[in-house]
Amino acid sequence: MGVIIWQAITVNANGWSEAGHAINHLYDILFMMGRDDIPVGVGGEGGILPNGTILPNVGGYQPIIDQGMSTAGECRYRQAIPVAHRGRLDVNSNYGIRKAFLPQGGRRYTPLKQPTAQQVMIDTISSGPTTVFLMGAHTNFAIFLMTNPHLKKNVKHIYAMGGSVRSNCLKKDGSGNSIECADIGNLYPQDSNPYAEFNIFSDPFAAYKVLHSGIPFTLIPLDATNTIPVSKSFFMEFERRQDTYEAKYCLQALKIIRYTWLGDIFYEQYCMWDSFLVGVALSTMRNSHNHNGENEFAEMQYMNITVVTSNKPYGALDGSNPLITGYSIPKFNVHKNGVHSGHVQMGMQDPFCLQKGKGKCQDGYTKEDTGEDAVRVLVAVKAKASHDKGSSLGREFYKSFLNVINSPERSGRFDIRSQYPNHKEVLYKPDFEKKMRGNPIVFDMDMSAGDFLALLYLLKLPVELINLKGILISSTGWATPATIDVVYDILHMMGRDDIPVGLGDAFAVGQANPSFTDIGDCKYSKAIPHGSGGYLDSDTLYGLARDLPRSPRRYTAANFVKYGAPRDIENPELRQPSAQDVWKSVVEYLDPGSKVTILTNGPLTNLAQILRLENASSVIQGIHIVGGHIGNVYDNSKGNLFTVPLNKYAEFNMFLDPLAAKEVFTSSVGIILVPLQMQRRVSSFSTILSRMNATTQTPELVFARCLLSRLWQLQQQHYRYHHMDIFLGEILGAVTLAGNPHLNQTFTSKPLKVLADGDVTVIGEITIDEEQGKQVKVLENINSQAYYDHFTRVLGDHRQSAVLASFHEQERLWTSQPESINIGHNQKL
């Protein structure tokens, strides 16, 4: 066979990584490898109508059966994937290695300009015969097949990593006879579904449609990948052979993963999943004259299988199945009593699926079948042993992988350190020793666009007025946890690498799975869109995050025993502290008699946890809360929960963790509330941008202006961005906290209560309750014109200005002679 040409990559947006982080990660890898020619597609804003009509550019953020007209929605399958540690946080950051290693090229995600997954698939497959590799959920490709049946003829073959057909885990029964293990999947815990594997479980209906498409199909299931773990001998050989940048990048990630696993179980259970698929597929393609799938690396076998998409009894109308519930004619013309008509698993704690001893749901099971629903496919059943009997590498694929990853042909050009001749990681810390310190402040942010603007404002205020002691990151708001790196980059730009940043819990109160707290439900977070105007844009700061200088500080999965890790890791001082770690540190080093003021700009998850700590309220001066909507008080205006139209009066920050908000509003700590009604009075893009254009242009003002200009342009260009003024109003809390007298702020005390229970129509609403409400100082008026002037004047002040304006300036320093560098107070790492 001739040269294999890689044509395109599309991102699976409902699996182990978030779209925004994944797309930029791929761009950086391709830049390192000199392959900026390869198009990459992600997301899309199309939807599926109730009648089953699939509109163009569905983004694949939701499984097909749950996809509506929005990118917001449930997480019935995805909740099986951990959100933070050992899950999406670690994948999005590649365990902290990504920004420490990869170079940064010119390609990046940009709103409304990023090619979509469907666009890239159509363009690629239209051009001629194409082989498809599926290494995640099958959502994108299933949608392509359902909407482009005329292009199916151009797909030569499908290779998919995923599923689990037969158990290859043998154990003894009570009589000493060998029996198969009951649990053949890899979901955890397995008390609801012991059969499924993550990739197929992420969208069983999509996998069914792909499998039954009639296209030749080869499956690389757990049956085979379980026989090719990252063994100790392979790992040791990998450590000895790091001849290319790509080899070093892979090994560094594997080393951190190994450190986070107990004992030597890593060498038995962490397998070469996707890389094994690529090896088997390429070897098979090179031997395409053989029709039995013979290849160098895996034993193959034809099997008759199907994908289970629902559970018996079929035709049961229990409300779990969106294909048949509420329809006289089922969606996508599935049979009313057919294999798609049974109970569909509704999460990892679905009562239908839970069964003592062994879960009974089979959604996503790649099951052998002899009936008419079965499809004959080629299945890898076992990794082949090494041809070299004397080799310490027991599998033939081990040797091939190390040879290819270390080959000088088409190898990576450089990492971030070798890309620049004078690359240095430097911490910038201010010298405030001779200055009086102002009020100690802790800023709790959820990393929405408005929060970054508020952070810039706080960093610009004189330290004699505001002494920002720490930042807490709410992981339950508008951005995913890995976006913490953008916070580090902002602090680095502003010369404030001294400020600690703590990462909060991944779940709202009551949402974590009680038997395995790394996973949980999305009862509230489902209100945030995954695509445009939601996580995709927040995680990339609307495409502008890559303009910021790269901080030496970044999230890392590295940890040590003192903080619960299974073993100490190299450089444990670089570990990522938790929100509670940072809070405790701030309190420990308070001056005698001092108290902390907390400003919260997101859900109150972190704050509720802090208030549970012993004597916490005694060191809190007060809490300034940005959020909440007090219904029927001012002008009968509505809340801003635009993705939950039945809820008319809630505001996002209260809705995203209502139980935490209730805890805070029933505490003894004094609260100042900056409600949605007041935020809307200072949400004029045209006004604030005109003030910025007439103000001294500091680097921080220029960046803020670029961000605000982009939000305003997007709001005018596409309906998915209609809510951008929400983020402009979030700056108000920081400005109110500073207390400039020219703003003419007035407050009124009101007895307020947060509704945290009941149905979705009232959750997160704030009401006035004379009997049970807490007296809260509510911002009632402000001079909006003075506010705009004040905010832009502070950002335009040359004092406490950026020490490093942008990534481009950082690049200039890294390519300059060392003696020409003289910026701020620095300490080389």
Image (cartoon, helix red, strand yellow):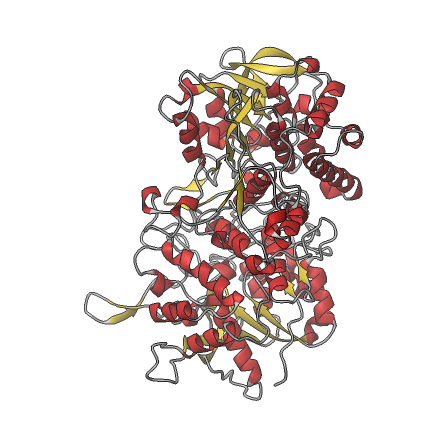
Rendered location of residue 208, percent (x, y): 56, 65
Horizontal placement of 748 versus 606: left or right?
Answer: right
The N terminus - image quarter:
bottom right
Asked if residue 61 can be seen in this view, the reply is no
Residue 210 point in image, percent of width and height:
59, 67
Q: Position of residue 354 (x, y in %)?
A: 39, 49
Choose between 333 and 413: the one closer to the eye. Answer: 413
In terms of depth relative to the viewer, which is nearer, 338 or 805? 805
Position above or below: 26 against 520: below
Is 475 or 140 nearer to us in this picture?
A: 475
In the displayed structure image, the side of residue 288 where residue 593 appears, left or right: left
Q: Residue furthest front?
A: 819
| Above/below status of 501 relative to 289 | above
Compared to residue 322, the image places residue 735 above or below, namely above
Q: Is residue 84 visible?
A: yes
Rendered view: 106 above or below 608: below
Q: How many marks?
A: 0
Q: Quadrant of residue 103?
A: bottom right
Residue situated furthest left in the rendering:
175
Residue in the image at 64% along x and 48% along y: 546
Q: Is residue 102 left or right of residue 227?
A: right
